Image (cartoon, helix red, strand yellow):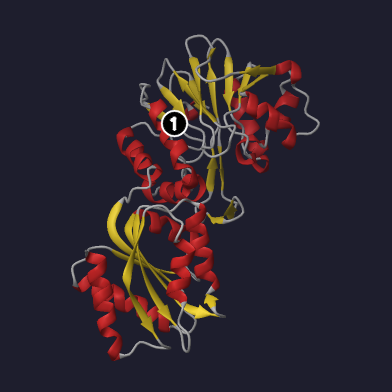
Amino acid sequence: MENNKLTDRVYYIGVNDRDIDLFEGQYAVPNGISYNSYIIIDEKVAVMDTVDLCKCDEWMDNLEKTLKNREPDYLVVLHLEPDHAGSIEKFLNKYKKTKVVSNAKSFLMLPQFFEKLNIEERKVVVAEGQSLNLGTSELVFVMAPMVHWPEVMVAYEKSEKILFSADGFGKFGALDVEEEWDCEARRYYINIVGKYGNQVQALLKKASSLDIQKIFPLHGPMLTENLAHYINKYDIWSSYRAEDEGVFIAYTSIYGNTKNAAYKLKEALERKGVKKVAIADLARDDMAECVEDAFRYDRLVLACPTYDGGLFPFMESFIAHLKAKNYQNRTVGFIENGSWAPIAAKKMRDEMEGLKNIRFIDEKVTIKSSVKESDEGQFEKLADALLK
């Protein structure tokens, strides 16, 4: 099975999941997802993480073919989330001499997932900077708490200069799909890891001292070229800086009138020379992509009707997602609609008031029921304010 050979001593034994519809029970993955697992074959043999239990049989088959009658000496557990650790028990029940390498936090959490698994005599507990010698290969462990679980660590293989990056640098999509890395990696990062920017920055600082020539994540393709591009994206995302100049208009509309207002603003912005104006219907477009675009661009406009004296539910949900992911460092404007008491702009601003370094635009668009000729000036004023 030589086609899974990645380097002199590292082999890929992961699997694609094309049966999944929602990743983590909420993120649409039309192109599936990969569960990456690796094996280092040296004087000692180390398996790097397992896969989701639903793909255990396929993974075990890949493992056995690659081992070629050898037995694993170690199972290295970088991350305990079930999509990576789901097959631990089956693996350890088959390979009864294999030792488990992880950190103290992981071993505390392991019984929460595998109540009857007793590995007390097989544990190898590692901490920051400690290493595991496999022969020519040597793994150095770097703790990465809250990227994006508290027990996460990454491993640096010194001889071939590989960073096994856990969920870091992962993306949605099976490995047999050809698509741009940035888009689905951004959606993955913002929605799954995005809350923990400070912790990602801390890990990037540690990683900067290592001579990394390859990055092998637990989801998505192995990164072997142009690593500066991927690292730069992670630096932008985790420091909450805008990736691109532009305006993202997120609207929700009951009868189409608020939608019409959102598109009126889009037209005004484009007339005034804004090169990128993205727009989305929060009720129909993928919520995770909407959150992604809110982080991608430096300006955001929220357009919402007043509903039961509050906000339309899709806008409430969108703002809740932004708050959960530590949305910050952006300029935000508002469009509101109401037939007798339009208060959506105030409600939206109140919901976002506690977010860090948000500049609210005082100019707002207020329409009553539908857009009229007399409203045109409001769109011009809001567009001008967004251009400043």
Q: Quadrant of the C terminus?
A: bottom left
Q: Residue 258: which quarter of the image?
A: bottom left
**Percent from the top left, x then y, of residue 217?**
48, 34
Q: How many marks?
A: 1
Where residue 200 appears, as percent x and y from the top left, is 44, 37
From where the camera sits, is residue 37 visible? yes
- Give coordinates of residue 42: x percent, y percent: 53, 13
Q: Residue at x 34, y 78 (%)?
A: 365
> Which residue is found at the position 79% from the left and 34% from the top?
115
Residue 356 position within the rendered picture, expressed as x and y whole percent measured from the top left: 41, 52
The residue positioned farthest toward the right in the image shown = 116
385 sits left or right of 326 in the view: left
Q: Residue at x 72, y 37 (%)?
A: 113
User: In the displayed structure, does residue 107 sit left or right of residue 17?
Assistant: right
Q: Amino acid at mark 1?
A: Leu
Q: Is residue 210 above or below residue 37?
A: above
Q: Residue at x 30, y 86 (%)?
A: 375
User: Horizontally, is 226 left or right of 61 in the view?
Assistant: left
For this view, does 6 lie left or right of residue 151? left
Quadrant housing residue 227 = top left
- Disc 1: which residue: 203
